[in-house]
Amino acid sequence: MSKKKRALWVHKDLLGLEYLSKEDIELLLDTASSFREILDRKIKKVPALRGKTVVNLFYEPSTRTRVSFEVAAKRLSADVINIAVESSSVKKGETLNDTGKNIEALKADIIVVRHNCSGAANMLGRNVNISVINAGDGWHEHPTQALLDMFTLRKKLGKLEGLNVSIVGDIAHSRVARSNIWGLTKFGANVTVCAPKMLIPPGIEKTGVKVTDNIDEALKEADAINVLRMQFERDSMEAFPSQLEYFKNFGITEDRLKKAKKDIIVMHPGPINRGVEISSGVADGQNSVILEQVTNGIAVRMAVLFWVSQVRDKDIKNEIGY
Amino acid sequence: MKLVIKNGHVVDPANKIDEVMDILVEGEKISKVAKVIDPKAETVIDASGKIIIPGIIDMHVHLREPGREDKETIASGTKAAAIGGITSVLAMPNTLPSLDSIEIIKALKEIIKNTANVDVFICGAITIGRAGRELVNIAGLKKEGVIAISDDGASIDRGEIMLKALEKAKKEKVLVICHSEDKSLSNNGMVNLGFTSTRLGLRGISKESEYKRVSRDIKLAEETGADIHIAHVSTSESVEIIRKAKKIGVKVTCETAPHYFTLNEEDLLDYNTNMKINPPLRSKEDIAAIKQGLEDGTIDIIASDHAPHTENEKDIEFDHAEFGTTGLETELSVSITELIVSGILTWSELVKKISLNPAKALGIDKGTLAAGKDADIAIISPDKEWLVKKQDFVSRSKNSAFIGRKLKGVVEYTIRKGNVVYKNTP
Amino acid sequence: MPLKQVFTKEEIERAITRISHEIIENNKGVKALAIIGIRTRGYVLAERIAKVINNLYGTKLDVGALDITFYRDDLSLVAEQPVIHNTEIDFDIENKNIILVDDVLYTGRTIRCALDAIIDFGRPGAIQLAVLVDRGHRELPIRADYVGKNLPTSQKELVQVKLEEIDNEDSVYIEEKQDE
């Protein structure tokens, strides 16, 4: 009767989709479906994480992701503490590891960390015993954003296998693109990345994606398009296209969409720059699911918070298999 | 004071010795190497089953003194060297202040005289403050005993200044060591540019940033006829450029470091800052090319590029962590594990790369066990295995890229000028 | 330990029919009635009860499924990780008389979770509890309004309810718990 079941979830931390199996991601998406239902109730709250404390540790300003995690934690009845740290003071201030250990000593259960340095969440996860959820690290990964994108796609189209998904924008500097690529390719989606050549990172085709700098080609067969936020103010040594030139060649407009599949799904991680990477008409149009993404983001983050807090010490696998 | 080492397998390529011999040491010098030496001495070491080599000469070591004694000192660094079988080191000039004046060299020599456990030779800077603009007083430094010059950590971007440096160095018979890196091409990178840098979301360092500068430096050496030495070669292209230069007779030597033939970029996938090194860990193909270069003799020398850093400088975000790994205590064992065990080098060839060739390149009368030479000797158990553990390091810094690795080869004795400066106590 | 059958297929059928009649009697008809079963076997029983009532009265009762995982107070205590099912209550429970259905009533903690969960959906007129088996050993002040069978058990024993829709048989067994 009491046969040993395999643990469903074995990761102390959620650091990136590169490190998860397809089954791991499926469990998160299925659980998110259960939570998505709760969000439509009158009382949008369950006691699953009652007594747990979630700390949002943000080294980069991000109202959107921080609020989404905060709402998710509160819907699970967890207590939430927000800590915003000026990243400019990182050098002279307390180290990330010390801050993490202090949060652990305060008896918090989960740290949600956003950091401008790639690998910051990995480092924190190694150095504390409590769970760490990566809310975006440098150019590396933004796993919950990709999970909510995948959740939205699956909800809309019923599956991920075989879907044609194009990601358009600054792929080189985008953690959203990387996480989406790892996640979608694990499900057998056909991913195309589209950007000016200078914004395609080296070797990206080794993940199994198609690369193009032709937006019409990226749109042609696409079931869905994920439009990345463009930041032209970055202080970079690299060559960068001008804003006008970018919109002309890569901006998602009604005219361009006319050549795509009629019911193509348009996603955007937000906040959107109207007239920079996407026209207002498309952002507010019938193909856009941008606001649904926001709601789904809560459900997905609830699922992540729930599962990292279900890990028993005995179940924890070495976080990254390298 | 007499010392006899009995029954050890002596590897001394300078004299084409590679067999069981006895060695007699009298005072600071080796007095005899023969089949059987009667052990009438104060000290007799039984070296049965051990390998005996001339003390290792590590020509790329950052001892950090003066200025960064929190990372390493002459005393702590040379103690670590002795553990690694190293009896001579070349101290790099990127100290605080840089080793760019007669005064600072004089002060450093005083520290070395009082605190060093092995021989410390000095590499001066090429330019004042290693800023790449104004040449140091090369003749003056040479008079103070400086045997090589380098702006290590930086390359001189302006060709005409490098040219002038090479001309002066040739006149003064000082070796110029090139940290060949074009920083405008390495782009503030942190790891090898390619799929790995993409996966990690870190800025990449292109291979061009190294090999284009290697190419320039070799061209300038060819023009001037000066002796140059290319430090820490990491890419396949650099190996090929040096191979071709040697073929046409350019006077160039080069070194690589143990991590460049052992670790590759994918070892970085968990953001281990101890593996953040400049030049960066490269691809598996580059490792194969480095090994090929070692095997065919293109790469003359193995040096550790021992770069100690404090935990505060390493136990932080990858972006902010300092570049470099320590190496003095692991250099020999990594070389045995990666090169001898796999048959890439024979013991005799390895001894050339870690002792004889650096002695020749630096123009110092060492690197051999011939009678009359300095009694700098390392006695090694070649098959003994050990696990690299952070807490076991003697260097003041613990930032080794090899922590957690199992290595072969343990140094049992290190003898410097006839004195046992390290003895392994199990 | 061999399994001991304590409830046959026919007995289960009779118990469901009887409970259905009691529900009608107690609520003076089917008005404002809705049935919610606890995942997974409680939901199966809820559907069977609804079918009996619908057949008798030609009604189409609302039936909902409730997963109580997120309301459990022992998530951090139990050794194995929970399996999550969807909650599906796609009708308004406001002022309804809710019949909450589960297979076994034991400590009462599952029912406590279910009550919390239902109340998060709105304010029902009343909640009544129907169970196939009441095996005693309550840890909370909870009792069932409709019981298929009272089954005195020791805490060492396990009660297994098997239902056709899930287990390919209708039966209830008692098993001595193995020492771990």
Image (cartoon, coloured by chain):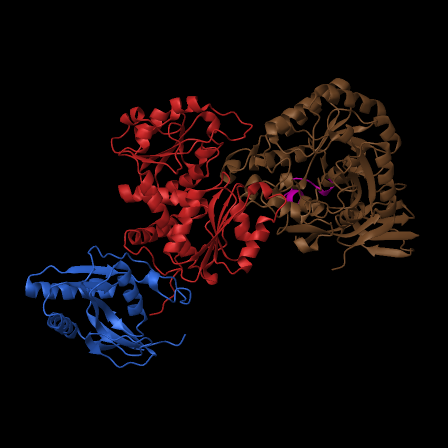
Chain colours: A red, B brown, C blue
Residue B341 belongs to magenta span: yes
Q: Could you say where residue C50 lies in the image, as x and y percent from the top left?
A: 14, 64
Identity of the residue drawn at 84% across and 26% down = B137
Question: Quadrant location of the C terminus of chain B?
Answer: bottom right
Q: In the picture provided, is A47 more to the left or to the right than C142?
A: right
> In screen coordinates, is B283 left or right of C78?
right
Q: Is residue B393 above or below residue B275?
A: below
Q: Could you tell me how many numbered marks the image carries?
A: 0
In the rendered view, would you say A140 is above or below A316? above
Give x and y (percent) for residue B425: 76, 59
Which one is in front, A215 or A300?
A: A300
Q: Position of residue C151 (x, y in %)?
A: 24, 79
Picture quadrant of residue A10: bottom left
Is residue A157 something one can see in this rendering? yes
Q: Is residue B57 above or below residue B242?
A: below
For the residue pair C41 and B27, the one nearer the viewer reads as C41
Q: Nearer the viewer, residue A72 or B179?
A: A72
Pick the residue in front: A104 or C8: A104
Residue drawn at (26%, 30%), measured in percent from left and top? A261
* Residue B400 appearing in the image: no
Q: Which residues are magenta?
A: B338-348
- The x and y percentages for residue A213 are 41, 25
> Against B172, is C82 above or below?
below
Query: Would you identify the image quadrant in which residue B254 lies?
Result: top right
Reply yes or no: does residue B358 show up in magenta: no
